[in-house]
Image (spheres, coloured by chain):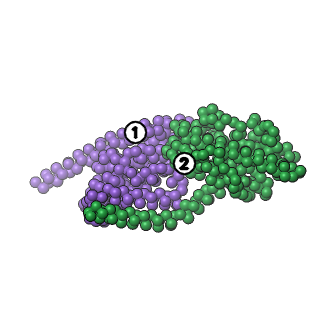
Amino acid sequence: MKKTKLGLILMLYASIACASLAVVYAFTKDSIERQSEIQLQASLKDIFPQATAFDVVENLTSPEPNIKFETAYEVKSDNVPLGLAIKVSGPSYGGNATLLVGIDLHRSIAGVRIMALNDTPGLGMNASNPTYYVDKAKKVTFLGQFEGKFLTDPFEVKKDVAAITAATITSKSLTKLIKTAGDAAIAYMDQKVMMASMEDEKPTGETSIGASPAVSTGSPIGAPGASAGTAKESARPQAGGK
Amino acid sequence: MKKLYSVFKQGIIFDNPLLMLMIGLCSAIAVTTNVSNGIGMGLAMTFVLLFSEIIISIFRNLIPSMIRMPVFIIVIAAFTTIVDLMMKAYFPDLSKSMGVFIPLIVVNCIIMGRVEAFASKQNLPSAIADALGMGLGYTWVLIGLAAIRELLGNGTFAGIQVMPASYEPILFFILPPGGFFVFSLFISFNIWLKKKMEASARKKELVSKKEAA
């Protein structure tokens, strides 16, 4: 009998706590969602400054079981495609990390922004620190080093990707997220180009893609990597744009 | 009033939660890599401590002692979640850089310790004074630790470059060993300060006794 009473008292406290949490949650929910939406939009604009529209792509899924593509956008500027942006989340050092990865038509990374990351302050958290440089001389941040990097590169930490000091696991996991998103985006682009060229005699896919002359980003064009077969059409934007 | 002041004062130097009671050290060393984290963590922690002590002190006679621990945890967890949500909604940048340490306030021994050792036995005004004193004691140590570690380990203060560009940051201070090192210096400083204050208090007592005699 006494134990039941104790249980009931505990239940009472728990329900009061629950109720008050529900109130605060309802109160802050909109604001939190708005913050993350603002952050997402700002990051998209930041990666693709010329973009005017971000169309949601539905049928893009991750090949890895533990990595998830939350949303994907086809980035366009006045109906001219600029590339793809994928919001990808997957395991990192301190739980799941969420990144926004932009891929341009040069088959390189246009930019990477952090949406959510739980990591050790001062160590892994430096991934999101705009004044933490992996290359001090050139002032390149951890995420900054991916900008303009071609997806044919190996993406291996401590080889072609510089790691964050004392945060190798974070560096490796974030690199993997970027690579996975990038590869999926390239596959999606290839598929689209193929479909477009099959659909019509006129190479619509080529013109629409080719007509984005270097507006994308200032990434090095014609660097190694952009090669082979279908790549040629999409990788050399200046070819069609003359 | 005088009693409240002495309770308040206790947490700052004499019973400083970090330097004298030595509780809640994990998050203290982990977040003090820059000053804004130190301030944010100190305030968040003080908020949770204050409201938990208020609630527990008000309901102290209505909590059966057999289940006091789970009740304390419920109260503390509720306030921590409130802080976490508020930070996410109104200070997203701060919330991002503190990461997992805000939710971890729940298991911070300082709150559990003060609620169990103090608030569950004292009336409301004393509990508030204790929470504020302990919170201030926690916050000043965090800010001090963070200032030294950030300055030496990163050459900045609250994100602003202070050291000349030629200064090569000493990574040691940002990493945990450096945290322990600076922290131990703070402990010795605090003990020195405490002894000094005790000596001067004793002297005052002697003088007043002599005058009375």
How many residues crowd mark 2 within 10 Å: few (<14), some (14–19), many (20+)?
some
Q: What residue is drawn where x is 49% and y is 59%?
A: B85
Q: Quadrant of the N terminus of chain A?
A: bottom left
Q: Position of residue A64 (x, y in %)?
A: 62, 44
Residue placed furthest toward the right:
A201
Q: Is residue A116 visible?
A: yes
Q: Dot 1 corresponds to which residue?
A: B180
The chain identifier of the residue carrying mark 1 reads B
Q: Dot 2 corresponds to which residue?
A: A96
Q: Position of residue B119 (x, y in %)?
A: 29, 59
Three-letter code, disc 1: Phe
Q: Position of residue B53 (x, y in %)?
A: 33, 60
Three-letter code, disc 2: Asn
Q: Nearer the viewer, mark 1 or mark 2?
A: 2
Label 2, secondary structure: give it.
strand
Q: What residue is drawn where x is 14% and y is 53%?
A: B209
